Image (cartoon, rainbow, N blue to C red):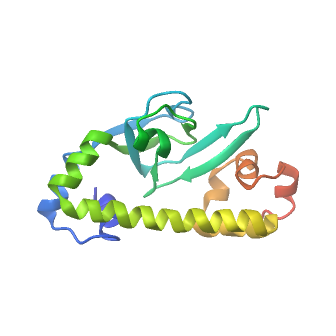
Amino acid sequence: MSAFKNHLELFIPLSEQEFDQILQYFSYRELKKSEYLIQNDQLVDHTYWIKKGLLISSFTDSNGKEHIIQFAIENCWITDQDAYYNRTRATFNIVCLEDSEILCLSYSNREKLCADVPKMETFFRRKANDSFVKQQRRLLTYMTSEVKERYDLLLKEYPGLAQRVPKKILAAYLGVTRETLSRFRY
């Protein structure tokens, strides 16, 4: 659990006692490659921190085209944000691309955790701010940049990802064809 403690300490200082207390609010889960964590139209009660593995969040449009919304590798969080925070049904599918180990935090436990360990409210606020900045950069890059620049940003945000993910999925994330992606993949 030292990786999780290190992740939290990027945003807040923690004593061992505080960290032990925080862990009590989480459960542990292992998933196999191709296993769904969340499926479209499912009620979503958890957010997840990735200890080991690789997951993707995707949306399939009315034409059947899959759009990759997020990659989650080690030390990342993932859930269907709208469904989790607004207590509604999922819009996205989240599936494992590799065998994965995750920490699970239910909505009610998150609320209790923030009340019982106020530092965690600070953690979640700072983590959300960090995520908003990254999403804004991705959106601006997607709207204003060529595919090569979008690909370079992806590799910067997720080092080593290109070796772990099939071309089809990388292309779906970048909004291009596999053939376009093949022209500049190293």
The quarter holding residue 153 reads: bottom right
- Is 76 positioned to the left or the right of 97 in the image? left
In this orientation, which residue lies closer to the viewer: 97 or 176? Answer: 176
- Is 159 positioned to the left or the right of 3 in the image? right
In this orientation, which residue lies closer to the viewer: 19 or 134? Answer: 134
Q: Is residue 59 visible?
A: yes
Q: From the top left corner, tell me how far across and down residue 135 is, in percent.
A: 58, 62
Residue at the image position 64 percent from the left and 64 percent from the top: 138
Q: From the top left corner, tell me how far across and down residue 69 is, in percent.
A: 62, 49
Residue farthest toward the front in the current orientation of the protein:
86
Q: Is residue 154 visible?
A: no
User: Dividing the image into 4 quarters, which one contains the C terminus?
Assistant: bottom right
Residue at the image position 47 percent from the left and 38 percent from the top: 83
User: Dividing the image into 4 quarters, which one contains the N terminus?
Assistant: bottom left
Say above or below: 30 vs 153: above
- Is 145 positioned to the left or the right of 106 in the image? right
In this orientation, which residue lies closer to the viewer: 168 or 77? Answer: 77
Say above or below: 76 vs 101: below
- Is 114 positioned to the left or the right of 73 in the image? left
The quarter holding residue 18 reads: bottom left
Q: From the top left corner, tell me how far across and down residue 39 is, in percent.
A: 54, 30
Residue at the image position 54 percent from the left and 36 percent from the top: 33
Q: How many marks?
A: 0
